[in-house]
Image (cartoon, grey):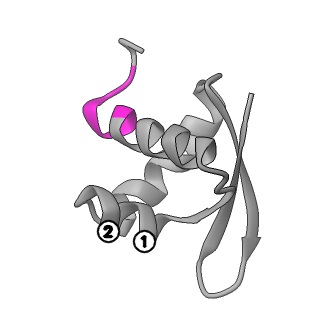
Amino acid sequence: MSDYTDEERRILDHLRESVERGERYFRAKNIAKHLGLSSKQVGVRLPELAEKTEDVDIEKWSRSKSTTWRVEPT
């Protein structure tokens, strides 16, 4: 994971741990609140992480008030 920034590693760690507990759907604002980041910081990185990580499968799931991301283990 050396090609990930510190923020990307923190987001991935959070997603992996949450998926292990059975969570599957996430919003950037909730991840940001948990990690002490801004929603924008997380929201910008999730599509990038979806493309480059093989640890979890990140998929843009739906958009209502804010985008929901579905995360599955790989």
Q: Could you tell me which quadrant the C terminus lies in?
A: top right
11 sits to left or right of 21: left
Give the residue at mark 2.
33
Q: Is residue 5 above or below residue 42?
A: above
Query: Between 8 and 23, which is closer to the camera in this rendering?
Result: 23
Three-letter amino acid code of the residue under disc 2: Lys
Give me the residue at 66% from left, 68% from top.
68
22 sits to left or right of 61: left
Give me the residue at 65% from left, 22% from top.
54
Residue 26, percent across and down? 59, 63
Residue 39, percent across and down? 37, 67
Gap in angstroms between the C-alphas marked 2 and 1? 6 Å
In the image, the segment drawn in magenta is: 4-9
Mark 1 burial class by Cα count in 10 Å: few <14, some 14-19, many 20+: some
- State the SS at label 1: helix
Q: Main secondary structure of the magenta part?
A: helix
Q: Could you tell me which quadrant the N terminus lies in?
A: top left
Give the residue at mark 1.
29
Residues at circles 2 and 1 in contact by the CB criterion of under 8 Å: yes
Three-letter amino acid code of the residue under disc 1: Lys
Residue 51 forms part of the magenta stretch: no
Q: Is residue 56 above or below residue 70?
A: above
Query: Between 49 and 27, which is closer to the camera in this rendering?
Result: 27
Asked which quadrant contains residue 16, the reply is top right
27 sits to left or right of 54: left
Residue 38, percent across and down? 29, 65
Residue 7 forms part of the magenta stretch: yes
- State the SS at label 2: helix
